Image (cartoon, rainbow, N blue to C red):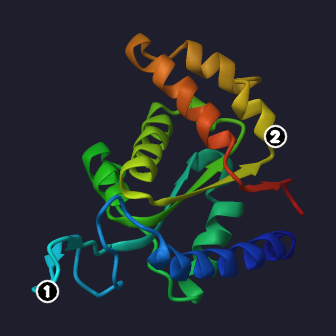
Amino acid sequence: MACYFAPPVLVLAPFLFLSLGSALLLPQLGLCVATMAHSVGQENFAPSLSTPILTYENEVFISFHAEDTRTRFTGHLFAALERKRIRVYRGEFIQAELMKAIDTSRIVVVVFSKNYATSNRCLDELVKSMECKRVLNQTVLPIFYDVFPSQVRKHKGNLAEAILNGPEDKVNIWKATLKDVANLAGLHLKPYR
């Protein structure tokens, strides 16, 4: 079964590796990203510059629904990135810790699956990721695993039901965020391919 997942993961890892290099060239709303020094999640001020230089604890944060993809695609993705020595967040599933990890990651990979939207935690991670994309110009890469981008964009299937059952104060934010992220360039993968 692992051999079926190897090609998409092998295709994705170099893309992420290249994205890490190109992210250095993007302006960060007045913030200058210079290096990925081994400092841990703090801002450093260069003496000759008046703008802070962002540093990252993680190069990649992966948002995924564990029951759908942990032992399949996502497990292979973690392994492939770690083989390339790309720092991937693998920490606690505590809300505050997850939000900090998203803030301090250069790239957020969102693995949409059939039950992704049934998790309020996943949807909150998605909102935070898109906020960081807008404010910090972080890269957000959606992967549609066994779902179509149009299902996410138009809130079809399990997504519609899950969103309607969510807290009223978050439903409209989740809908807008799902639409925004589904319009980003990403990968559409079918299971076992």
Which residue is nearer to you in this view: 187 or 157?
187
Q: Position of residue 27 (x, y in %)?
A: 41, 67
Neighbours of disc 1 within 10 Å: few (<14), some (14-19), many (20+): few
Label 1 sits on what residue type? Ser
Q: Image height check: is 32 above or below 167?
A: below
Label 2 sits on what residue type? Phe
Quarter where residue 104 is shown: bottom left
Q: Position of residue 30 (x, y in %)?
A: 30, 62
Q: Using the rendered image of the protein, determine whether residue 90 is visible from the camera's viewpoint.
A: no
Please give the name of the residue rendered at 55% of the width and 27% of the height, measured from the top-left corner.
176
Which residue is nearer to you in this view: 100 or 74?
100
Q: Mark 2: which secondary structure?
A: loop
Quarter where residue 74 is shown: bottom right
Q: Position of residue 44 (x, y in %)?
A: 16, 77
Q: Position of residue 77 (x, y in %)?
A: 64, 70
> Which residue lies most toward the left here?
47
Q: Which mark is residue 48?
A: 1
Q: Is residue 191 left or right of residue 80?
A: right
Which residue is nearer to you in this view: 81 or 126?
126
Q: Using the rendered image of the protein, determine whether residue 94 is visible from the camera's viewpoint.
A: yes
User: What residue is shown with label 2?
Assistant: 148
Quarter where residue 79 is shown: bottom right
Please give the name of the residue rendered at 49% of the width and 35% of the height, measured from the top-left corner.
123
Please give the name of the residue rendered at 47% of the width and 45% of the height, measured from the top-left corner.
130
